[in-house]
Image (spheres, rainbow, N blue to C red):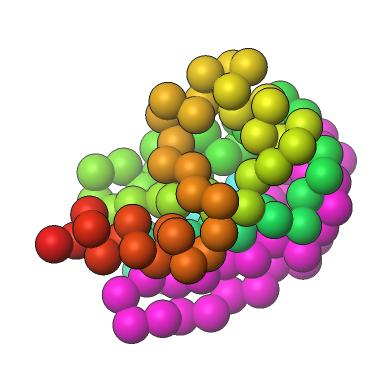
Amino acid sequence: MNLQIKNEESFTLVTLDETRLDASIAADFKKQMEEIIDAGNNEIILDISALNFMDSSSLGAMVAVLKKIGTQGKLIISGASGVVLDLFKLTRMDQIFILEKTVDQAKEQFETLSA
């Protein structure tokens, strides 16, 4: 599984360079994200724009990441589209997660939430 990590001034940009996030890599995704959080990065933009498939186990991993961050930080997901966005909406997780169309919009959301 391939995650690109870029530390910005007030947040960490994590880019998921995979087209599928399913049960075969969901546990690895969760573990790597938890390591990022344990390293002190709890203000995260997760760019999933490359994804064109995601299953319920992956959504569960994202919920676990959100719980790990808790109230000590923020997780904004950018780039969800197509069937990936449909999964968030179908499960009503679009009510739980902050979803933005682009990384730039997610950055603006961070500025708004931090103000």
Q: Nearer the viewer, residue 40 or 2?
A: 2
| Quadrant (top left/top right/bottom left/bottom right) for the N terminus | bottom right
Relative height, residue 69 to residue 9 (above, below): above
Q: Residue at x 68, y 27 (%)?
A: 86
Relative height, residue 19 to residue 26 (above, below): below
Instruction: Tell me: 112 left or right of 18.
Output: left
Q: Is residue 35 visible?
A: no
Where on the picture, by quarter, is residue 21?
Answer: top right
Q: Which residues are magenta?
A: 1-29
Where on the picture, by quarter, is residue 2?
Answer: bottom right
Q: Residue at x 66, y 34 (%)?
A: 85
Query: In the image, residue 48 lies at what x, y percent?
Result: 66, 54
Query: In the image, residue 93 lies at what x, y percent?
Result: 51, 25
Residue 63 sits inside the magenta stretch: no
Q: Is residue 112 visible?
A: yes
| Quadrant (top left/top right/bottom left/bottom right) for the C terminus | bottom left
Instruction: Tell me: 111 left or right of 25.
Output: left
Where on the picture, by quarter, is residue 61?
Answer: top right
Residue 8 sits inside the magenta stretch: yes
Q: Residue at x 44, y 36 (%)?
A: 97
Q: Nearer the viewer, residue 24 or 18?
A: 18
Query: In the image, residue 106 lies at what x, y percent?
Result: 43, 59
